[in-house]
Amino acid sequence: MKNFFKHIFIFFLIPMGLVIVFFNTKYALYLNESKEVYDLVEETEKNNVDSFTILLGDSVCRQFFGNLKDDDVYCLCENQSYEIPGNYLLLLNLLKRKSKFQNLVLVINPRTLISSLNQPYTYNYFIKPFRPLLKNLDREEKKYIEHIFPDRDLLKYKFSNFELQNAFDILNDTLAAPYNISKVNLKYLAKMDSICRRNNIDFKIVSPPLPVSNKDYVEKMEVNRGGELLSEYFSSITYYPNGFSKDGLHHKDPELYSKNRPEQLKEVLNTSE
């Protein structure tokens, strides 16, 4: 019997312990699909960014502008799953580090505005990497997160198998129109605007270029909320032929688009001088 328990300890408990230790170190992020989001949060926590314009936003933004990291424009776009609340938390980090910038451009696709922290990857791309910052959300969002998502991560840096029930797929085109912009995204958009005003930062929200298949979806969106910010947002959307898209949102060859249509990308970055 002693040998039995000894073998269990040696062949089961010790390896399990090593696995737990490993996935609680940052080395585990090299096996994590959302590593770039963890890196982004850490970058804004530890470094100040002193550029004329900072870009926050999603992976479509990163496709077109991810190589811009200089004194003029600095791109911090990564993923749409953390929605506007995640970008709000990144903005708080930037200001906490006393980053000096005159313009903030939030570049995000319109489909994300419909979601409410309820996407298939909200847990892995928002809750887990942003967990130290979630205390800065409003009480309503904190209660929602506590109720819906696991409250602790035994394997801190492992990509979780957690599945959100009835998760919202931003590519779902079977919703009943009009498509309403979510209250949570409207709330944190207003918060970002207010913070920027207090800090004398010019702020705007724009859409990245999209395949034309999104035009019908956008036309079904309720555009009468969010005031001037969203009015200008919807007028900023430009479309390209569907054949150039790989998945309905991302461009197959963003470098080619940048070469052939530089004026559209320049307009996205059009900020105050």
Image (cartoon, helix red, strand yellow):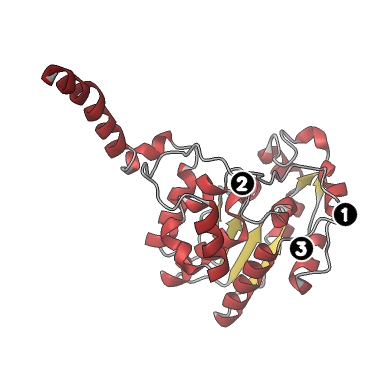
Label 2 residue SS: helix
In three-dimensional space, the C-alpha distance between marks 2 and 3, rounded to whole angstroms, equals 18 Å
What amino acid does circle 3 point to? Tyr
Pointer 3 or 1: first along the chain: 1
Mark before the other along the chain sequence, 1 or 2: 2
Residue that mark 3 sits on: 233
Point 11% across, 20% down: residue: 2
Toward which corner of the image does residue 189 lie, by quadrant? bottom right
Residue under numbered circle 2: 59
- The residue that label 1 is drawn on is 219
Q: Which mark is residue 118?
A: none
Task: Estimate how packed mark 2 is, as few (under 14), some (14 to 19) or many (20 or more) residues with alpha carbons within 10 Å.
Answer: many
Q: Which residue type does callout 1 highlight?
A: Glu
Return the x and y of residue 229 as percentages of the image width and height: 74, 70
Residue 74 is at least partly visible in this image: no
Circle 1 residues within 10 Å: few <14, some 14–19, many ≥20: few
